[in-house]
Amino acid sequence: MKPKKIKQFYLLYNRIVSPYQAKHLSKEEKISIGAFYTPPEIVSKTVEYISPYLKNKDITVADLSAGAGAFILPFKDYDYRAIDYDYSVINYLRNQLDEDKVIHTNSLLKVRRSKFRIPRNNFLIITGNPPYNDITSVYKKNGKGEFICDPDLYDNDIGICFLKAFNKLKADLVCVVHPFSYIGKRWNFVRIKDFTSNYRLVKGVLFPSTMFKYTSRTSPFTVMIALYERDKNGMTYDYIENFEFKILNTDKKFVLNDYSTTDGYINKYQPRKNSLLKESPIGLYYYSFRDLNSVKRNTTFIDKKHDFAVVVTLEEFYKYAYLHCIRKLLKTEYMWLFGNLSPLVDIEFLEENKAIFVYYALESSSTLKSFNKEVIDLIRKTYLKNFSLTLEQSKNLILEHFKSLFKINEAI
């Protein structure tokens, strides 16, 4: 789409879509079903990405979770489908679009092109911002009903169900908004293998979840505008690790392989195997964590065994002291970018500078300050021989290290 048309689209979006903003839903309902209507600059980026593909013949553009129609409005001159399960938005869409191209249905049930009246041989472009939420938190017992979808699409996360549906429809192009963690985390990448085996990421732009209304400001996460082409060779996780993601409205880039995390280096969860130590020899534990956001949110050292506690030994105390320092001192404007990843770590630096992190933890943790004096003396004897830095000097060194560690690089 040409710049002039994109500008016209902005005006249309602000006039028609923005005032709607899912006013029929309460704030709690918007959060529970993932009904967050998309800012116009995000929509316009998807339009920009899709535009070069509009030269193909026999095109259909479809949004399987159309909402107020923001992603479909720019393509009113093409064959399109606006599909949604929410009947109130369907009525709204029918007043804005061709009624025969607006479909009220469960997009994840009996998925096939004929259901949506999409010609079998058409070049199918799927766009939109599908809902993403853990269905185990949405559909409570005696609550909001039952989540129904095709068995081969099922996943605990509705957004992943939609990705599977796109593949089932054999979409030729997918340009959607979804959490970066779907492909950025190895485990999630495996969960969507039906999709990643048939699609290749061509472009990816990252932005914070706080750009959506009603999302948490305390635990922001990374969302991406993703452009995928159907490709029989698919993509590997190694491809994603080395992919150069852009950061919206900046000249910055983000490449997963530029960073190392604590995965495989620091235990995140309480031991499950019988062969692992389940009680700390020194009586110290650390609250379990999933990612950086949970490290920043949860408590640190614990002085008694806990169902959600990791065993801390004398030999590995410095690693948890490092996590404690992250919780206390790390501040970065890009917390949203790193929050869903495991904490970053430069293992070589940490191994060579254990004392700095141990000293700061001992001096700043209320649990450690009141802990068994014999154990604390043992920790000091083990890690702080000939240590002469002040607390302020230690703090400044840690801050400088974090600044370097969490640095975002310029795009080439």
Image (cartoon, helix red, strand yellow):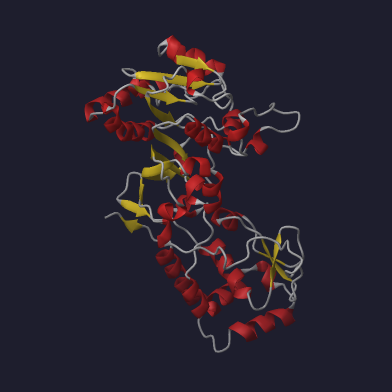
Q: Which residue occupies 72% across, 69% down?
A: 276
Left or right: 174, with 219 as reference point? left
Left or right: 172, with 91 as reference point? left
Rendered position, 377 above or below 318? below
Rendering coords of residue 347 (x, y %):
50, 72
Asked if one can make out residue 392 in the rendered structure from this viewpoint, the answer is no
Q: Which residue occupies 48% across, 50% down?
A: 184
Q: Quadrant of residue 382?
A: bottom right
Rendering coords of residue 39 (x, y %):
41, 32
In depth, the one of 408 and 275 nearer the eye is: 275
Rendering coords of residue 144 (x, y %):
68, 27
Q: Quadrant of residue 309?
A: bottom right
Q: Which residue occupies 67% across, 38% down?
A: 136
The N terminus is located in which quarter?
top left
Q: Quadrant of residue 286?
A: bottom right
In depth, the one of 362 and 152 nearer the eye is: 152
In depth, the one of 283 and 161 nearer the eye is: 161
